[in-house]
Amino acid sequence: MTIRTLSARAGITLGAAAVLALAVPLAASAHVRVNPEQVEAGSYATLTFKVPTESATAGTVKLVVDLPTDTPFTSVSYQPLVGWTTEVTTSTLPKPVEISGTTVTEAPTSVTWTADPGVQIAPGQFQQFVVSAGAVPDTGSIVLPTHQYYSDGKVVDWAEATPASGDEPEFPAPTLYVNDQAPSGGHHGTAVSAASAGDHGSASASDSSQTATVGLGLGIAGLALGAIALVVAVLALTRRPRGSAAGVTGAKR
């Protein structure tokens, strides 16, 4: 085996390890999330939906968040986002709901963000969509199914509820925890009070830091394996008997 062949194989191995190192942090930070996860009943919470584009070939051009109808919010407003058109849809509830002694028959049922022409969340990017919702219902938790539309026509439904065990499903729905506690571990490990913007920022930074640390550690491990493969290939070449190499050369002559 020639030096050129060994070098090429070692380079391919090291390159694959580098791709793994870059891909692991991306995978760890994927999925649509809502922050904060823990909110107080009766409060008006500022909710931030963090939306990454997971496709390598298409961009995100639309986002729809379904709001609860059995425990509805009485008010939802949005923070304007440049390049996006936002619409809060109010509908008649399937059943009237009693809230603070008042019978409520209509409530906000969805929020839709649509990208303007030429605008998208490109591969490798993310966007944050912010709403204010309240009053937060006095309930255990609130599932917010979210639908992510791509420029190639694909739709990803983040609509699976996370079980009490905390084991995350393949397409988890963003979830607000009110009287229930957020499942421990993973992205659900930090409870945040919606009343404190400072605590909200600290929790978000903590989650991001933990995700980045895990991704970086796995990435370094991948690079280390690639480097070991390169060293083994070089050692294998240098330990070949010189006489054998000379014999091959002589045979060719």
Image (cartoon, grey):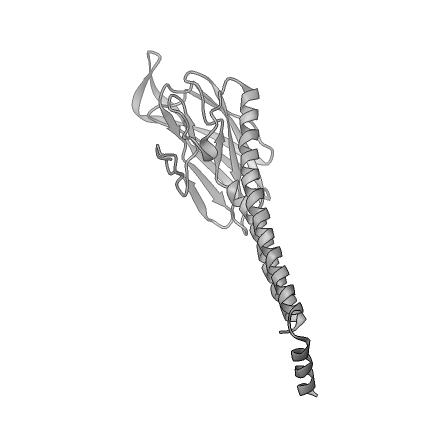
Can residue 141 be seen at all in this image of the molecule?
yes
Q: Quadrant of the C terminus?
A: bottom right
Q: Looking at the image, is 173 positioned above or below residue 239?
A: above
Q: Looking at the image, is 217 positioned above or below residue 93?
A: below
Q: Please state the horizontal and vertical placement of residue 10, each as a whole percent of the image.
A: 62, 63
Q: Please state the horizontal and vertical placement of residue 16, each as a whole percent of the image.
A: 57, 57
**Most foreground residue, 6 or 32:** 6
Q: Report the residue that reaches farthest toward the top.
A: 101
Q: Please state the horizontal and vertical placement of residue 130, each as a whole percent of the image.
A: 53, 28
Q: Quadrant of the N terminus?
A: bottom right
Residue 100 lies in quadrant: top left
**Most foreground residue, 199 or 96:** 199
Can residue 123 be seen at all in this image of the molecule?
no
**Most foreground residue, 2 or 60:** 2
Q: Is 159 on the left or on the right of 63, as rendered?
A: left
Residue ID at (50%, 40%): 62
Residue 75 lies in quadrant: top left
- The mark total stands at 0
**Most foreground residue, 56 or 104:** 56
Q: Please state the horizontal and vertical placement of residue 238, each as a whole percent of the image.
A: 67, 68
